[in-house]
């Protein structure tokens, strides 16, 4: 077998049967560990990790069924593959008990040794592949975290020179002693516009990193207060667009992280303001809907709408649609919404048609009411 040797545990109270099973499995070239009782096996399982367990049914003290039941109760060993080995043929009652305990097979000792060896080999290889996959996941997680840290650092450090560029451009534009011709003024204006746009992109990238990495604090969240906090951040844009925003009461409470949820709503309302129809003050409605054990929150607008072909695509990073709107968006806002809602254990989506408007929604777990009588606490 390729790869590192793994541990296989055999449990039987008879030394001769242990020797016979070791001989059958020796061609696999794995680490064969033996135990002569259920209690000894349980002690070994607490100390070491095994690919598969071969377990005798009839043993003194605690038998194989009792041992298997205790193994399944332990978080560390509950998924361990168990093959029962017995000198007695399997009855329907025994098989029912075996599979109820989550065992993978029941093999009589007089059965073909090649079949037993082949079955153990399958579980050994599965274990080896799972270990390799686990190591790969851990490595990818570590690399992803390093990449996020690098992106955050780069984005943060870029803002200082960008502010310098913007500051010098403002001096060129506003300093009375500096005379620029029309072309010069246009160049300076483009520098300022590009600097502003890049600064917005950097801010949103930093926001995405915070949403993805910040530890979440699940608590009871009043949606009304979160919506008002998000709208307060957008007061200037709302006034500039002369937007009409209505919040339908009552709004329920949810179990969520308040800061992340505020970030979601801020981006959804900002998106509705940004993609309004030219010449029409946007009308935005925010309301909640009961969905069994979840709450669906809607942000509805009467803007330019979105072709159904792009309903999923728009939640990707840097995705911007060619919709004829000259906006200052970065294509990051809805990616922040998607990532934040995912981390909050919710879902998101949109219903929209071109020239009709859009209804963005998020679904979050409902805040469950406590069934504990306050008088009984203490």
Image (cartoon, grey):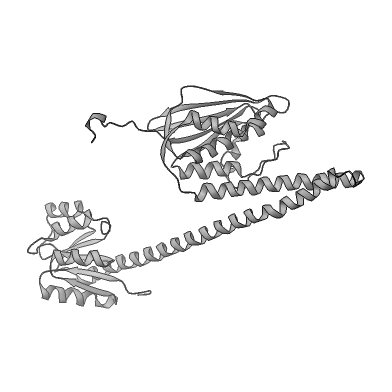
- Residue 304 visible (yes or no): no
Comparing 131 with 307, the one in front is: 131
- Residue 344 visible (yes or no): yes
- Above/below status of 328 relative to 272: below
Q: Position of residue 309 (x, y in %)?
A: 60, 39
- Residue located 13% across and 57% down the image: 66
Comparing 4 with 150, the one in front is: 150
Q: Position of residue 375 (x, y in %)?
A: 23, 29
Q: Position of residue 222 (x, y in %)?
A: 45, 31
Q: Position of residue 92 (x, y in %)?
A: 13, 52
Q: How many numbered marks, from 0 up?
A: 0
- Residue located 48% across and 21% down the image: 249
Q: Quadrant of the C terminus?
A: top left
- Residue located 69% across and 53% down the image: 160
- Above/below status of 261 relative to 38: above
335 horizontally vs 370: left or right: right
- Residue located 21% across and 62% down the image: 83
Which of the 4 quarters of the picture holds residue 264?
top right
- Above/below status of 24 relative to 322: below
Which of the 4 quarters of the picture holds residue 182?
top right
Q: Quadrant of the N terminus?
A: bottom left
298 horizontally vs 357: left or right: left
- Above/below status of 120 relative to 170: below
Outermost residue, left side:
60
335 horizontally vs 98: left or right: right
């Amino acid at each position: 077998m390729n790869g590192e040797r793994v541990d296989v545990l055999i449990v039987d109270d008879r030394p001769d049967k242990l020797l016979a099973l070791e001989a059958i499995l020796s061609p696999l070239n794995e680490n064969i560990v033996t135990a002569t009782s259920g209690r000894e096996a349980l002690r070994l399982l607490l100390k070491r990790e095994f690919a598969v367990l071969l377990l005798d049914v009839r043993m003194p003290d605690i038998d194989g069924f009792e041992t298997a039941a205790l193994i399944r109760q332990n978080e560390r060993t509950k998924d361990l593959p168990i093959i029962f080995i017995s000198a007695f043929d399997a009855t329907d009652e025994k098989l029912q008990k075996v599979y109820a305990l989550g065992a993978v097979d029941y093999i009589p000792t007089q059965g073909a040794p090649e079949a037993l060896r082949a079955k153990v080999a399958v579980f050994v290889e599965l274990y080896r592949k799972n270990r390799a996959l686990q190591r790969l996941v851990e490595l990818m997680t570590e690399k992803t975290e390093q990449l996020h840290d690098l992106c955050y650092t780069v984005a943060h450090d870029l803002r200082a020179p960008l502010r310098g560029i913007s500051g010098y451009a403002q001096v060129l534009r506003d300093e009375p002693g500096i005379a620029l011709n029309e072309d010069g003024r246009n160049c300076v204006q483009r520098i300022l516009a590009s600097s502003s746009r890049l600064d917005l992109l950097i801010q949103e990238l930093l926001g995405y990193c915070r949403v993805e990495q910040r530890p979440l604090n699940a608590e009871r969240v009043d949606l009304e207060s979160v919506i008002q906090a998000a709208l307060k951040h957008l007061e200037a844009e709302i006034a500039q667009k002369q937007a009409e925003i209505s919040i339908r009461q009552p709004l329920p409470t949810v179990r969520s992280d308040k800061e992340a949820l505020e970030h979601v709503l801020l981006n959804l309302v900002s998106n509705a303001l940004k993609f309004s129809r030219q010449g029409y003050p946007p009308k935005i409605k925010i309301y909640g809907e009961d969905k069994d054990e979840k709450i669906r929150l809607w942000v509805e607008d009467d803007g330019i709408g979105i072709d159904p072909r792009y309903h999923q695509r728009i939640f990707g990073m840097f995705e911007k649609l060619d919709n004829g709107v000259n906006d200052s968006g970065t294509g990051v806002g809805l990616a922040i919404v998607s990532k934040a809602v995912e981390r909050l254990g919710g879902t998101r989506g949109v219903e929209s048609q071109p020239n009709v408007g859009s209804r963005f929604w998020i679904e979050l777990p409902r805040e469950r009411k406590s069934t504990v009588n306050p008088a009984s606490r203490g």
